[in-house]
Image (cartoon, rainbow, N blue to C red):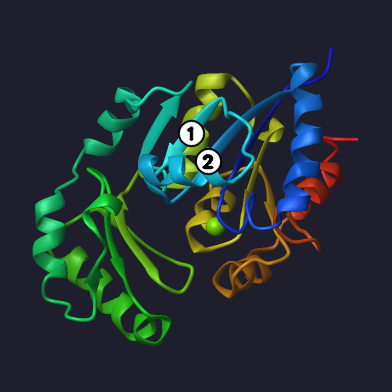
Amino acid sequence: MVAKFLLITDLDNTLVGDRHALEQLNQALMKARQSQALLLVYSTGRSLASYKRLRAKEPLLVPDALVTSVGTEIYYGGSTTPDPDWSAKLDQGWQRDDVLSITAHFNDLVLQPEADQGPYKVSFYLSSTLATDLLPRLEVALHIRGLDVQVVYSGGKDLDILPLQGNKGHAMQFLGHQFQVSPEQTVACGDSGNDQSFFRAGQERGIIVGNARPELLTWYQESAADHHYLAKANCAGGILEGLRHFGFLA
Ligand SMILES: [Mg+2]
């Protein structure tokens, strides 16, 4: 019997971005699925509605689970109700209104549209030129108010404030337990800052695609480990390369 593995991948500029490479990867994944060797999970900063718009444009295989809103919502099998156990975990100590009352003091933070907010995610736009100065001040302000949150800056534009448990890495580990797949048989793929939590989580294998953003590359260079692989190829081509590197695909 083939050992089962869990592939969890970011969408924008990781799985999606090179159509030809995506189609090649899909072929390889469909084969792995036929031998029941693969569990496929997408993990995105997008909301569920925004994921559905992407799915209408791109040839995406149906995943076994979908993680949206930067790790704060988990869906199974086409359901539109998030996993209540995961939501309950995030709810502990999360005070969304208090977060908003603090961020209101930062004029450079531009609130993202309502459709991109979530019960466990407060999101802003912030340019990278302003971020260097603003992020440490914001973290201090949140800390002084005693709010146990994490601040995630990604793609040189998106700033998310999330519950402590709510990130892509913790959602990956939650799903590993749900699906009973070990960290060594789990592989996560990403390109930007909000994917860093995948690679910091534990012993899960990590693939950083060749087109990764500077914020992720810098982190990788400072914390390189054998269970992380920086691909030469971009997007889905990098995922395929990494899956072969780790021996998950021939
Ligand atoms: Mg991405």
On screen, 158 above or below 116?
below
* Residue 21 image point, x, y percent: 77, 51
What residue do we see at 55% from left, 46% from top?
57
Q: Quadrant of ligand 1?
A: bottom right
Q: Where, by quadrant of the figure, is residue 62 drawn?
A: top right
Spatial separation of the CA atoms under disc 1 and disc 2: 12 Å
Which image quarter: residue 188? top right
Q: Nearer the viewer, residue 194 or 201?
A: 194
Picture coordinates of residue 228 (x, y %)?
Answer: 71, 53
Q: Does the CB distance between marks 1 and 2 fall below 8 Å?
A: no
Residue 28 vs 114, above or below: the answer is above
- Residue at left 78%, top 59%? 231
Check disc 1 and give the amino acid type: Leu
Vertical placement of 249 versus 15: above or below?
above
> For this view, does 84 lie left or right of residue 154?
left
| Image coordinates for residue 226, horizontal then vertical, percent | 76, 53
Q: Residue furthest front?
A: 57
Residue 234 visible: yes
Element at label 2: helix
In the displayed image of the protein, which residue is found farthest to the right?
A: 250
Secondary structure under the numbered disc 1 in the rendered image: strand
**For the residues carrying marks 1 and 2, which lies nearer the camera in this image?**
2
Viewer-proximal residue among 134 and 109: 109
Q: In this view, does 138 lie to the left or right of 152?
A: left
Residue 151 in the image, given as x and y percentages of width and height: 33, 62
> Label 1: which residue?
66
Name the residue carrying label 2.
Answer: 55
Number of numbered labels in the structure image: 2
Q: Is residue 18 above or below residue 105?
A: above
Dividing the picture into quadrants, the one containing residue 53 is top left
Q: How crowded is mark 1: few (under 14 residues within 10 Å), some or many (20 or more)?
A: many
Which quadrant: the N terminus?
Answer: top right
